[in-house]
Amino acid sequence: MKTLLRIDSSMRLKNSYSRRIGDNFVQEWKIRNPDGKVKHREVGTCFIPHLDQALFEEFHIDQNPSEKIRLSDELIAELFECDEILITVPMYNFGIPSSLKAYIDLVVRTGKTFRYEDKPIGLLKNKKAYILSSMGDIKTDALSFVEMHLQQVLNYIGIKDIYFYSLDGTADENYATKQLHNQITSFNNSINNR
Ligand SMILES: Cc1cc2nc3c(=O)[nH]c(=O)nc-3n(C[C@H](O)[C@H](O)[C@H](O)COP(=O)(O)O)c2cc1C
């Protein structure tokens, strides 16, 4: 039985394109994995503490864990327990939402998700990731800053099998709705063939 970890990071709960693409993905995923389990981690609309010096020092200490380090442990355990990861993510100011960055800073931990020998070695093995992103402008490069950033981070912690899907031009509702309908079918076909 497979487990999918879904991480949503749009600050919008309603009318969010990235969440909508995510909903479609989960629907299709459940058809492909009828016994599968979907675990949800919300980061867009709840507070994820920022990494600070005290927390960073705690990364290397085992005693008297604070609430923040317990959250970091829980988020890391969730990553190890899943087989596939779905991240829905909007572009904010040319990058990922700060809440998702705060999440990343809690899960990229030496000795937990990577270790250093002569080069960094990611410790999350045999996992697939799907990055479903949305942006207001028209995308001009093969991968946006959002996609490149997440690719780097996931690679660093060992996740190399990554699938990207982006919906651009969401600033124009008519254009975006048309794109969404046109692309969703080819997207479903491509994930079904993976
Ligand atoms: C604070 C903020 C900053 C944004 N910055 C960018 C940006 O740098 N580039 C871009 O193409 N769109 C930008 N957008 C537009 C969003 O990427 C777009 O509305 C996207 O659809 C949001 O995702 P969602 O529909 O899942 O909420 C920004 C939107 C907000 C609210």
Image (spheres, rainbow, N blue to C red):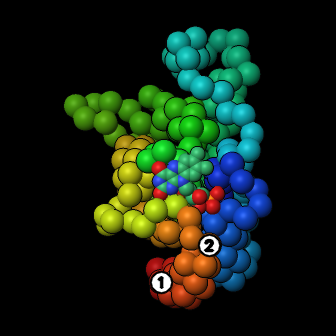
Point 65% across, 52% down: residue:
10
Question: Can the viewer see residue 107?
Answer: no
Point 40% across, 47% down: residue:
149
Relative to residue 21, is residue 135 drawn left or right? left
Is label 2 in a helix, a strand or a loop? helix
Per the rendering, the mark at residue 6 is: none
Point 37% across, 43% down: residue:
156
Is label 1 in a helix, a strand or a loop? helix
Which amino acid does the dot numbered 1 rest on?
A: Ser
Point 33% across, 65% down: residue:
140
Per the rendering, the mark at residue 190 is: 1
Q: Which residue is mark 2?
A: 173
Q: Is mark 2 within 8 Å of ligand 1?
A: no
Closer-to-camera residue (167/78): 167
Which amino acid does the dot numbered 2 rest on?
A: Glu
Closer-to-camera residue (192/172): 172
Q: Quadrant of residue 52?
A: top right
Q: Mark 1: few, some, or many residues within 10 Å (few <14, many ≥20)?
A: few
Ligand 1 location (quadrant): bottom right
Residue 158 horizontal/vertical position (percent): 40, 48
Q: Mark 2: few, some, or many residues within 10 Å (few <14, many ≥20)?
A: few
Q: Is residue 52 positioned above or below 6 on the image?
A: above
Q: Is residue 123 positioned above or below 68 on the image?
A: below
Total tally of numbered discs in the picture: 2
Residue 182 horizontal/vertical position (percent): 54, 87
